[in-house]
Every structure is written in C-alpha cells, then in structure tokens.
Amino acid sequence: MENGPKVTVEPPDRRGLREVSVGGETVGSAWSLKGLRRILRRLGYPGDVNVKDGTFIRWLGGDSRTWPDQPVKRRITIAVMMAGLLGSMVLLVVIGMPDVLRGLTFAGRVTGFLFVFAGLIQGLAASAVLDYWGKRRVRFSGAAVLLGALIALATNSLLLLLWLQEMEYTRYLLAYFPLWCWSLGALWLLVREKTWTGIPHPKGFAAGITATAVIAGANLVYSSMYQPASQPLLVSLEAKFGKPTVDPRTSFVELPLTLHARNKGKVPAYIISDDYSVYGHMVKLSKTSSGLQDTKKAMEDESDAARYASGAATETLSAGRFLSIGSSLEPGEEYTAERLVRLPATADYEALEVYFSLGLIRKDRGRISEWEFPYPHLSWEKDEGRFYCPPRDCGESLIYHSKVQHNNNIINVTRRPRYVTTWWTITPEDSAVSTSISSFSFQPKGTIDEAESKREMDRYDVTNVYAEAMVPFAALTEEEN
C-alpha cells in the first residue's frame, strides 16, 4: 500500500464537499467519511483501510474528522426545491393541455403550448436540483434550476394578477398562491447561491426568458381580447310570410312562414336562446282625427303613433322554436325552417307580424357542454331535483343549464365557475325566452346577480339577433277571394 499512488483529500468547499484524487487525477468527491470509503472500495482498496495513515492519505484543509456538510439541511433543500418545481410543472400542464387539445384559435393553442412547454422545462429543472445540490457533475444544472424558478415566478404571478381582478375562490388558488410564495423564496436562495455563474452568456439567457414571457403574455391578450374583438360575429336572420291559401273544408287561412339563419362570418357560435312568435294586431280606426293618437303610450313603448288608428291590441297566434337550443352555427352554415300559421278567414286583425330571435355566444370566447346544455329540464317535474320549482311560483318552463368555460383556460382557473341558463316558456298569452350567465347553479337559496350576469354576458360577447316581418291581413284574404 505504501508503494501505491497517494490519495489526496482536498479541503471542503463552501458546501462541505471534499474532492478526492489519486496521483493527481480526480476520482470523485465525498460528503462524509462514509462516502470516502465508498470511493476507496470502488478503487480496489479494502473497506477497513486506515484513513489516518498519512503515508496513504494526504489530508488538505482538515483531517478525517473535517466534514462540514449538513446532510439534513441539504436534503430538505432538495426536497423543497423539487416539490415546488414539480408542483408548478403539474399546474402548468393541467392549465395548458385543454387549450392545446380544444383551443379554437391559433393564438389560444399557442398559449396552451407555451404553458405545457414551460411545465416540461420545470420538470427538467426538478431533475437538475439533484445534481446542483449534489456533486454538480453537469455544468449548467444551476442555470436550469434558476430558469425553472423564474418560470414559476412569472406564471404564478400572472395567475395571481388575473385572480385579483375578481378575487373569487377557486381550488386552483390553493396551488398557485403557495407556488408563488415558493418561487420568491427559491429565487432568493438561488440568487444567494449565484447560480448564473456557470452560464456562458448570461445576457442572452435573460433575454431568452424575457422574450418567452412577452410572447406568452401577448398571446394571452391576443386570444382573450383582441382576436374576438377583431372578428365580428355575423349572423343574419330572415322571417318571411309566403302565399296564403284557404282550406275549403274549414275556411281557415293557412299562411306559410319561412325562417332562415345564416352565419356569414368566420366565427362559430352556440345558439343559447331561440324563439319566434306570430302576432295578430287589432286597432280601432277613425276617419276623423285631431292629430296623432295614443302619443303617451307610443313614447313609453317606443312604438309608433298614428293619426287614424288607436287602441292597438295584440294577440299571439303561434309560438315556437327555430332550432334546438345548444346547437352550433358554424361559419358558412345556414338553416331554413318552414312553419304554417292557421287562423280563421273572418279574424278581426289589421296585420300579422312575426318576431324571430336567436341568442348566440361565440365559440372563440366560451365553451358550453354539448352533452348537457341541449337537454332541457322540466321546471314543473319534481324528479328534476334542484331545477324543480312549483308552477304557482315559477310557472312552467324548459330550463337549459350548463357550465360555460372561457376559451382561454387561464381565465377558468382564476375564477369560480360560470353557468349559462336559458328559460323558455309558452303561456296562453305569449312565449318568452331569457338567458343569463352567472355563478348561479340552482343551489338552494341561490339567486342570480343581475349585475354579474350583465358583466358576464358582455365578457362572453353574447349577441342577440332579430328579424321581423309584417303583412296586412286584408291583403291575405283579398288575394284568395
């Protein structure tokens, strides 16, 4: 053994790690005496070699008892750093994947991809923690950990800023708020460690991180604000009465009605409300008059005032739907529906009018469950559970209800869920349809916040389109006579 190469144990570095060399060649490093013996056994020396033998081992900067490493502290640091990076990785992948898989806009998919990609980088950074707080065999492991911590700070700061706009509880808050706190502590530790020391071009490294953050932020703004505003929803409706016929068996006028809808733009949409009604108008006519009649009522109703007609009354003759609520209207799609309105030829109407409306929500702004929303709940059926409401209190309505999600999943995880609800009712007098978007989900003692609903309808850019048509009733009967 005396003739063998001399083993040299270098002084401990600032972390307590001591380098081991044989004949001037580095053969490993050790945190403790146990680690040193493991290196010696690997080199072929017996496990019980006398480490105090100065002819065999030369100790520099201390002796065999000089091992300043604090293994408990080091392992806790490794565990905390890895937990933060892996937790942030999981959060970013969970947030980004829905946009990658189901995003309807290119910018939205890019944002989702950037989140997933950033999460994968954090996974690599988590593996680099073992090397950086270990024996540092990889040169840039510290830079990788620093990059992961910077990504965690940037993304969790973005999520917190979006959360502060509404300050609503969401279970994701239990993830990104602790991770934001963790990222601050991790960066303080990494700055103190000067982990950027081994980076060959630190300015380029910083510029790359900044550029990535700018791209992600720009895509978020573009996909959630600019693009929906720059591409208008262009849906046209048409309602038209056809040529009437008189059934000789019943002496009833049969009046065809054509309803037509077309998406002329580039934005797909969900139909969240759908209703048409046909009205018969009755008025009192007078050949003499001193001026416009019913002026106060006309001003209150924002309707027309006439000189020779007054006392207008309206009756609903027919009501129904054009398409199924919850169906889609894709770019270029158009639908036509034919209806038949029947009424006695002797009816005392001056004119017939059809009012046709659709409520639409842009698909590039929100997503609705196509397995839930199109299927209505009967408000008068007790088996409907939370949707049941006694008819004496609520009347009888079809209720369409579903969670609505923003097309950018970053918005969804920073706010509590929103629900779109449509009520459609036909009474002996008329039909009615109303829609709301709010956090109301038919829970006991819950009510719809009208201010919230208006704000959410604007946020999801809900659009209502209308079409009207009117024909004189006398012209219909005269044509047949």
Image (tube, rainbow, N blue to C red):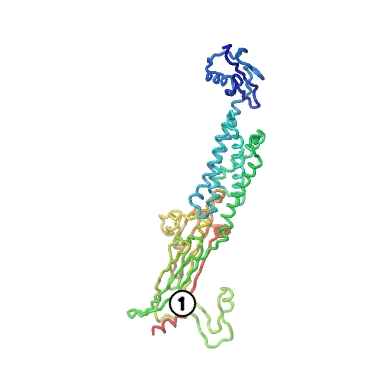
Looking at this rendering, what residue extends furthest in the left direction? 249
Quadrant of the image occupied by residue 8:
top right
Quadrant of the image occupied by residue 79:
top right
Residue at x 53%, y 82% (from the top left corner): 309
Q: Is residue 330 left or right of residue 142?
A: left
Residue 297 to residue 227: above or below: below
Helix, strand or loop status at disc 1: strand
Q: Amino acid at mark 1?
A: Leu
The picture places residue 128, in percent across and down from the top left corner, at: 57, 34
Q: Nearer the viewer, residue 168 or 334?
A: 334
The picture places residue 391, in percent across and down from the top left corner, at: 44, 61
Say whether residue 393 is visible: no
Q: Nearer the viewer, residue 46 or 456?
A: 46
Q: Quadrant of the N terminus?
A: top right
Residue 142 to residue 13: above or below: below
The picture places residue 228, in percent across and down from the top left corner, at: 56, 59
Residue linked to disc 1 = 352
Q: Quadrant of the C terminus?
A: bottom left
Say whether residue 154 is visible: yes
